[in-house]
Image: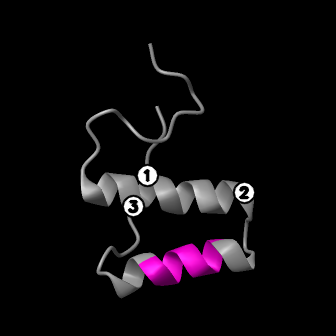
Amino acid sequence: MTDETELMPPAATLPVAAGAIRQAAADLDPGGEAQLAVGQALRAVGLHQLVLRRR
C-alpha cells in the first residue's frame, strides 16, 4: 500500500527521482526561490522537467 504523500517509488530511476525532487520543491515553496533553484539545478545537469503523476 502506498501513502498518497509518497513521491518517490522504491526503485526510482534518475529521471523519476528528479521529478520527485522538483515536485517536493514545488510543494514546499510554490513559485519561490527554492523551487526555481531546484529547477535550474536539475536543468543544468540535463534533467529537464518531467511530469510526475501521483497515484
Residue 17 lies in the magenta-colored region: no
- Residue type, numbered disc 2: Leu
Q: Is residue 9 above or below residue 51?
A: above
Q: Position of residue 26 (x, y in %)?
A: 64, 62
Q: Which residue is mark 2?
A: 28
Q: Is residue 23 above or below residue 44?
A: above
Q: Which residue is mark 1?
A: 52
Q: Position of residue 21 (x, y in %)?
A: 49, 58
Q: Residue at x 64, y 72 (%)?
A: 35
Q: Residue at x 62, y 61 (%)?
A: 25
The local secondary structure at tag 3 comes to: helix
The range drawn in magenta is 35-41
- Callout in the foreground (2, 1): 2
Other-residue count near label 1 (Cα within 10 Å), few / some / many at <14 / 14–19 / ≥20: some
| Camera-nearest residue between 51 and 36 | 36
Q: Which residue is mark 3?
A: 18
Q: Position of residue 42 (x, y in %)?
A: 41, 76
Residue 51 visible here: no
